[in-house]
Amino acid sequence: EDQVTQSPEALRLQEGESSSLNCSYTVSGLRGLFWYRQDPGKGPEFLFTLYSAGEEKEKERLKATLTKKESFLHITAPKPEDSATYLCAVQAGGNKLVFGAGTILRVKS
Amino acid sequence: DTAVSQTPKYLVTQMGNDKSIKCEQNLGHDTMYWYKQDSKKFLKIMFSYNNKELIINETVPNRFSPKSPDKAHLNLHINSLELGDSAVYFCASSRDREYSPLHFGNGTRLTVT
């Protein structure tokens, strides 16, 4: 069965304090790994898609990387507006995404 | 312009009632979905339609019935609501069946009392 585990469950950072979120996965035949951001009361917002080990994507202060077993979302010099829940999801066959439970990030100024 | 919109945003109802949630997307996407987010925040797929054809039907009680009148709309009807149906339901769409990222609506919080 496809599984996604995210860690830590919650992370508190000071503004400017860089860190990483982890997404480890077990899937037969990875077609893609997706990162989403979810703000309270809103739907998930797409950030990145990674397709193969070694691939990296960047957007502003965020950088996503992928290995054969896990993905990292690196946050460089975060700001309070980066506070959100970050969700990781994997896609195997078909168009069904399997989501992790997310990491709640709080950035304090 | 809202890309994926769903109504209502909040729905409070009693056990045994029947209710519907509506979803519309103006992105021109071919595939639409219903996801359920439970109290532990896990998002789980319920249904997926591609050009009005049902392509994913997860293990969901048959009290839940999706309907897609056209590829821009996907509604969810729930019969005989139960306490365990309380959750946030998200509609989403994607350009095609595989690899394309999902675009989500802002959810419908259903509370069954």
Image (spheres, grey):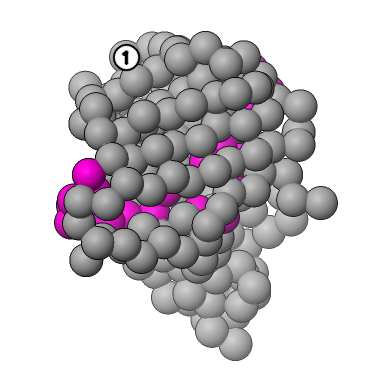
Type of amino acid at the residue the image marks with label 1: Ser
Left or right, B1 with respect to A65, comes to right
Give the residue at x 44% y 37%.
Answer: B76
Residue B14: in magenta span:
no
Of A58 and A35, nearer the camera is A35
Left or right, B52 with respect to B47, comes to right
Position of B75 relative to A93 (above/below):
below
How dense is the environment of label 1, judged by Cα within 10 Å: few (below 14), some, or many (20 and up)? few
- Can you give x and y, in whole percent of width and height, for residue A15 in the image? 59, 80
- Can you give x and y, in whole percent of width and height, for residue B15 in the image? 20, 56
Quadrant showing the N terminus of chain A:
top left
Local secondary structure at mark 1? loop
Give the residue at x 52% y 61%.
Answer: B9
Q: Is residue B100 visible?
A: no
Of A83 and B75, nearer the camera is B75
Of B16 and B46, nearer the camera is B16
- Can you give x and y, in whole percent of width and height, for residue B95 in the image? 68, 23
Q: Is residue B9 visible?
A: yes
The residue beneath circle 1 is: A28
- Can you give x and y, in whole percent of width and height, for residue B27 in the image? 76, 33
Q: Quadrant of residue A46?
A: top right
Chain of the residue under label 1 = A
Left or right, B54 with respect to B7, comes to left
**Which residues lie in the magenta part?**
B80-107
Give the residue at x 40% y 18%.
Answer: B56
Position of A63 relative to B63 (above/below):
below
What is the number of callouts on the image?
1
Quadrant showing the C terminus of chain A:
bottom right
Left or right, B101 with respect to A27, comes to right
